[in-house]
Image: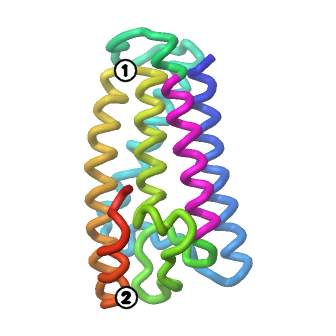
Amino acid sequence: MQGYFAIIVIILLMAMVLSRVFILKRQGIKVMRFGEMDKKDFLIPPFALLFFGLIFSHAFNLPKVGSLLFESGFVSWIGVVVCIVGLIIFLMSLIAFGKSFRVGIDEKHPGKLVTTGIFAYSRNPIYTAFGFILLGIFLILPNWIFLIYLVLGFWLFNRQVLLEEASLRKHYGEEYTEYCIKVGRFF
């Protein structure tokens, strides 16, 4: 049952992103900036598709890659709760972002600096949400491959945050520096 929830989480996450992209596109805002600054970003989609495939194979008892590290219904339910927290943080991030939401770094039209809503508590709530979701999915499906995804995901999020922070510092200057002093990178 919890495996089905992992699938629902991924579908909801993608639906939220795509709906925001289409809404902003109708307003004339180009949201998809993925890979414009760093072509290595294009290495991410194949790994994301593999991740989705692994979730589906575990949830539907299809042939699996890797084995479970442990089995615990209680831990799986904790994973469900952690995923729900991640989805709530992600939704709050999209709402607070407003028209400034981008997928990738937009050097030419970055939008206004968002420091309100959930951004008053975390400079990077979307990556925090992704972290919660990856952790939750690992707890639901504690496969060693999901553990590798969890570790690599945290590394990748931190890498992307550092790139984005450099861009934000360059664009917003002192305003962003003051914001960094007040609000933590992830929490």
Compared to residue 18, the image places residue 68 above or below, namely above
Find the magenta span and give its range: 78-96
Q: Which residue is drawn at 32% across and 80% down?
A: 167
Q: Tell whether 177 sits left or right of 112.
A: left
Q: Which mark is residue 99?
A: none
Q: Which of 176 and 156 is in front in this view?
A: 176
Compared to residue 126, the image places residue 109 above or below, namely below
Q: Tell whether 3 sits left or right of 141.
A: right
Q: In the rendered structure, which amino acid carries the disc numbered 2? A: Glu
Does the magenta portion include 42? Answer: no
Q: Which residue is drawn at 58% across and 20% down?
A: 2
Give residue 132's position: percent from left, percent from top: 45, 42
Q: In the rendered structure, which amino acid carries the disc numbered 1? A: Asn
Does the magenta portion include 89? Answer: yes
Q: Quadrant of the N terminus?
A: top right
Q: Residue at x 43, y 16 (%)?
A: 64
The 10 Å Cα crowd at callout 2, few under 14, some 14 to 19, many 20 or more, is few
Q: Residue at x 26, y 59 (%)?
A: 159
**Residues at marks 2 and 1, CA–CA distance in whole angstroms:** 43 Å
Please name the residue that numbered disc 2 is placed on.
175
Find numbered disc 1 in the image and state the secondary structure of the residue it sits on: loop
Give residue 160's position: percent from left, percent from top: 32, 62
Q: Tell whether 15 sits left or right of 78.
A: right
**Prevailing secondary structure of the magenta residues:** helix
Please name the residue that numbered disc 1 is placed on.
143
